[in-house]
Image (spheres, rainbow, N blue to C red):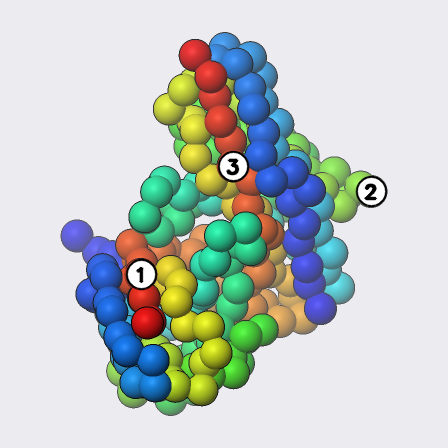
Amino acid sequence: AQSVAQPEDQVNVAEGNPLTVKCTYSVSGNPYLFWYVQYPNRGLQFLLKYITGDNLVKGSYGFEAEFNKSQTSFHLKKPSALVSDSALYFCAVRDDSSASKIIFGSGTRLSIRP
Amino acid sequence: DGGITQSPKYLFRKEGQNVTLSCEQNLNHDAMYWYRQDPGQGLRLIYYSQIVNDFQKGDIAEGYSVSREKKESFPLTVTSAQKNPTAFYLCASTDRNRNSPLHFGNGTRLTVT
């Protein structure tokens, strides 16, 4: 069965500094990995997804994610944080064995201070 | 504009009553999902459906039921057997490509007193 972990409930970063939101996963086959962002009282918005063969993928709003197969990680990154990046971020995974089942991490609240 | 519509946005019910949450999509997606969101617990999968007239239990299906009579619609019924029904419920859909992301509705906040 697949699983995904986001070890940090909250990440605090000063505006202009780089940010990293961590995600590790466990799947029985090939991983299909995604990052989403959620603003208060709204649904989730897609940010980016892992593309096979690309260890660094770029997505919306200047975000990117680094895939590491040996560490089974897919960390979300941004070189320079903005206050408007403050939101709840979720990592999600689906795998080959049950491709329709999509599992989410517990979420990481990102807080960017001016 | 294509998208997913969840209604109502806020729903209040008395304990012991069943309640049905609506989810409609016009994206022509085959697969649809229901998730429950509680503070600090992220999203937990309730039910999902890959095709009309077929659906599977997720990780927390007890106390919930669904139907998929039409491709566009995937209503969720929260029954009186659900012990802690107060939560934020999110509906999502995607196509058959495993690399395709989910598209989410804006959620229904259910409060049961």
Q: Mark 3 touching mark 1, by CB under 8 A?
A: no
The chain letter for the residue carrying disc 3 is: A
Mark 1 nearby-residue class (10 Å; few <14, some 14–19, many ≥20):
many
Is A45 placed above or below B65 here? above
Nearest the eye: B41 or A83: B41
Q: Which residue lies furthest to the left in this view?
A: B1
Look at the image and tell me whether residue A1 can be seen: yes
Q: Quadrant of the C terminus of chain B?
A: bottom left
Nearest the eye: A67 or B96: A67
Is B70 placed above or below B107 here? below
Q: What residue appears at the point 47 percent right and 58 percent down from the top-left corner? A: B38
Quickly name the residue at label 1.
B109
Disc 2 versus disc 3: distance between alpha carbons?
A: 26 Å
Residue flagged by tag 2: what amino acid is it? Answer: Ser
**Residue B94 at x, y = what percent?**
40, 62
Is A73 placed above or below B105 here? above
Quickly name the residue at label 2.
A70
Q: What residue appears at the point 59 percent right and 52 percent down from the top-left corner? A: A105
Q: What element carries label 1?
A: strand
Residue flagged by tag 1: what amino acid is it? Answer: Arg
> Where on the picture, by quarter, is residue B50?
bottom left
Q: What residue appears at the point 32 percent right and 66 percent down from the top-left corner? A: B111
Quickly name the residue at label 3.
A109
